[in-house]
Amino acid sequence: MKPLVIKLGSALLSDTAGQFDEAVLEPLAQAVAQRWEEGQPSLVVSSGAVALGRPMLRGSGGAALVRKQASAAVGQARLMSRYREAFEVYGLQPAQVLLTPSDIQDRGRYLQACGVLRLLLQSGIVPVINENDVVSDEALRFGDNDRLAVEVAAMVEAGQLILMTVEDGVYDADPRTNSEAQRLHRLETISEELIAAMGPPGALGCGGMGSKLRSARRAQEQGIEVIIASGRLPDNWTAVMSGSAFGTVIPAQGRQRPARRDWIANTLEPAGALRVDAGAQQALETGGASLLAVGLAGVEGDFRRGDSVVLKGPASELELGRGLIRLDRGALDELLRQGECTDQILIHRDDLVMRNR
């Protein structure tokens, strides 16, 4: 049976004063134990470390980012202690796994993390995963655990991802501002218009419903079913144990790409952009060609060999695709200055994902 990933958000794990609220951990542990009993390995993506660690810091000094990182350093140990206590009741052993975007974007580290997660599951151990806030910086971080949860679900080839929050599903409008908003029991297609209608995150959350929908759409493309629901309703945890439908169900679509190509298309953060001419655009979109230097019309960004870059057409800012560049920016500039070797491959077709294919 394919694994199950359950994500607990910041708002769900916080009370009205912003302090850590562990009430949800008992039904979570019971539900995870039931899924394991029925042969479905389960993982947890959990926020909560910063909220647990913040009260332990003395004084008011330090920059905001440093205080957050220090809070996470203290809070991670406390968070895992809470999980260990909750899971021990059901004979389960949790394991702490901390990830950063750098771990996901480096192919070697990504595969290593995949191997660790799979070995833990094979050993009957429950991975409890969080962003490594102690070393993540503001410029390169997941930002919210919705995105992290999808990355984890893709890494273990999960069959289902459950995003537990404080809202009992997805509504057709923001229920905080529209009293006539209706909950959607099933959502086949996630449009940009629906995402925009969700409004900003709540006071205690990081991503909000819009972030969950973007993540759910990515999971759909990976062949993963998503459920968005409230973790504060006991009936929802009963439904997790029984495998019944609850909240808003977002069904999986057929997997669009192999895992490596999806990693190129959706996981890597582009370090620059290449603008191609009309001939190159046609060859890339219809012929499955590699990108040659002769088809280059412009270069943006400071990238290194192996970085992800975006491809754009000759007269548009729309993204045509993404690929792994074979030259550093400096080497590419030198090649263009020389005007030679114009048939040199800049992005091989095996390292290129076009949006129309």
Image (cartoon, rainbow, N blue to C red):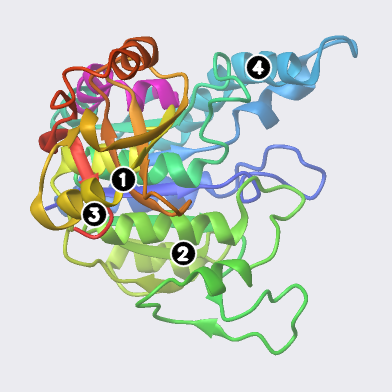
What range is drawn magenta here? 97-114
Residue receiving disc 3: 222
Q: Secondary structure at mark 2?
A: strand
Q: Secondary structure at mark 4?
A: helix
For residue 265, which quarter of the picture? top left
Q: Amino acid at mark 4?
A: Gln
Residue 91 appears left or right of 121: right
Which of marks 3 and 2 precedes in the sequence? 3
Residue 195 appearing in the image: yes
Residue receiving disc 2: 228
Q: Is residue 252 magenta?
A: no
Q: Position of residue 140 (x, y in %)?
A: 53, 25
Q: Position of residue 200 (x, y in %)?
A: 70, 58
Residue at 40% over, 43% down: 149
Which of marks 1 and 3 precedes in the sequence? 3
Residue at 66% over, 49% down: 11
Q: Amino acid at mark 2?
A: Ile
Residue receiving disc 4: 69
Residue at 32% over, 10% down: 331
Q: Are marks 3 and 4 in contact (CB under 8 Å)?
A: no
Mark in front: 3 vs 4: 3
